[in-house]
């Protein structure tokens, strides 16, 4: 087996302490090498690190939630180097953590993000949460393309935008709904193009194939209604995109016990 195989999962877990069991289920069923979590909703001291270390994830990078909000984490079977957390919009929000992961003689820079949701009203003039989201994306666009010190990079996380028509259950119905408004979609695409990253899910599943990673808790039967959105993403440097072997959206995880409203995505690479 190649020493340069690497699998990376991303998942908005919506409270890691409440849903620690389904993270362990992900590990038991799929055993990704690296797991990036968003919306952990706990301070670093409260994070259940010992539980995950028992499963072989000895290396953990945290940017913990404050007051029960936000928070991101990276769990890894391999050492995590050069851990960094960038503050966006001068809010001291725990919404980003970056690490370097080495496999064999190869190294990648991994950025894990939880982009602000943006509230309900898609008008920055009357909705400070939406204004924050647009400012956050603007700062990402300025900073992120040169933030990896020349290493090939992977951008993952809950970016809270479904950018393409087939990323939502109804393009027409959601055009004025936060997460799929034109201003958000254009901002996310401008960010992706600024860094030259490949949208890995769409590389393996081109439009018009529908791909969703989030289903609302409000639906009595989420699977039957299937009113989903693709809010969670894995982007890669073009060199890494060429080394990607598969990407999986684990839809069934939405039906696990005490589920998150998001599901995990796993990308597999052969860096050799």
Image (cartoon, grey):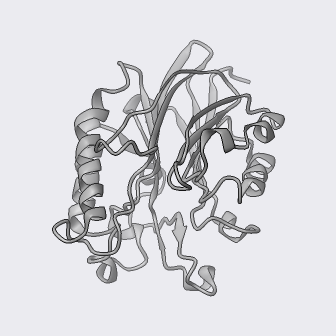
- Residue at 63% across / 64% down in the picture? 260
- Residue at 33% across / 61% down in the picture? 163
Choose top left, top right, bottom left or bottom right for residue 148.
top left
Q: Is 175 placed above or below 27 here?
A: below
Residue ranking furthest to the left:
125
Residue 111 shows in the view: no
- Depth check, front residue: 37 or 130: 130
Q: Is residue 164 toward the left or the right of residue 126 in the image?
A: right
Choose top left, top right, bottom left or bottom right for residue 252.
bottom right
Q: Is 4 placed above or below 39 here?
A: above
Quarter of the picture containing the C terminus is top right
Figure label count: 0
Q: Residue 75 at what x, y percent from top left?
A: 65, 36
Q: Residue 250 at what x, y percent from top left?
A: 64, 59
- Depth check, front residue: 105 or 187: 187
- Depth check, front residue: 241 or 233: 233
Quarter of the picture containing the N terminus is top right
Residue ranking furthest to the right:
54
Q: Is 148 placed above or below 198 here?
A: above
- Residue at 50% across / 66% down in the picture? 212
Choose top left, top right, bottom left or bottom right for residue 15.
bottom right
Residue ranking furthest to the front:
67
Q: Is 216 placed above or below 52 here?
A: below
Q: Residue 173 at what x, y percent from top left?
A: 33, 83
Residue 210 shows in the view: yes
Q: Is residue 252 toward the left or the right of residue 179 in the image?
A: right
Q: Residue 131 at what x, y percent from top left?
A: 23, 60
- Residue at 42% across / 25% down in the picture? 152
């Amino acid at each position: 087996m190649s020493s340069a195989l690497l699998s990376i999962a991303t998942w908005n877990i919506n409270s890691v302490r409440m849903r620690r069991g389904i993270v362990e289920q992900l590990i038991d069923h799929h055993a990704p090498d690296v797991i990036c979590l968003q919306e952990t909703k706990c301070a670093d001291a409260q994070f259940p690190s010992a539980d995950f270390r028992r499963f072989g994830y000895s290396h953990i990078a945290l940017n913990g939630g404050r007051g029960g909000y936000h928070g991101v984490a990276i769990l890894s079977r391999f050492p995590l180097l050069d851990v960094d957390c960038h503050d966006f919009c001068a809010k001291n929000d725990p919404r980003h953590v970056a690490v370097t992961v080495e496999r064999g003689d190869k190294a990648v820079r991994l950025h894990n993000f939880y982009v602000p949701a943006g509230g309900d009203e898609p008008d920055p003039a009357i909705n400070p949460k939406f204004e924050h989201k647009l400012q956050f994306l603007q700062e990402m666009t300025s900073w992120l393309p040169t933030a990896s010190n020349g290493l090939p990079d992977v951008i993952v996380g809950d970016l809270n935008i479904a950018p393409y028509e087939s990323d939502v259950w109804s393009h027409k119905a959601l055009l004025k709904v936060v997460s799929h408004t034109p201003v958000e979609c254009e901002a996310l695409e401008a960010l992706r193009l600024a860094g030259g990253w490949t949208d890995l899910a769409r590389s393996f599943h081109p439009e018009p194939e529908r791909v969703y990673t989030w289903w609302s808790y409000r639906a009595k039967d989420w699977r039957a209604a299937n009113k989903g959105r693709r809010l969670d993403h894995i982007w890669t440097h073009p060199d890494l995109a060429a080394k990607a072997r598969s990407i999986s959206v684990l839809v069934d995880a939405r039906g696990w016990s005490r589920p998150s409203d998001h599901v995990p995505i796993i990308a597999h690479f052969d860096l050799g």
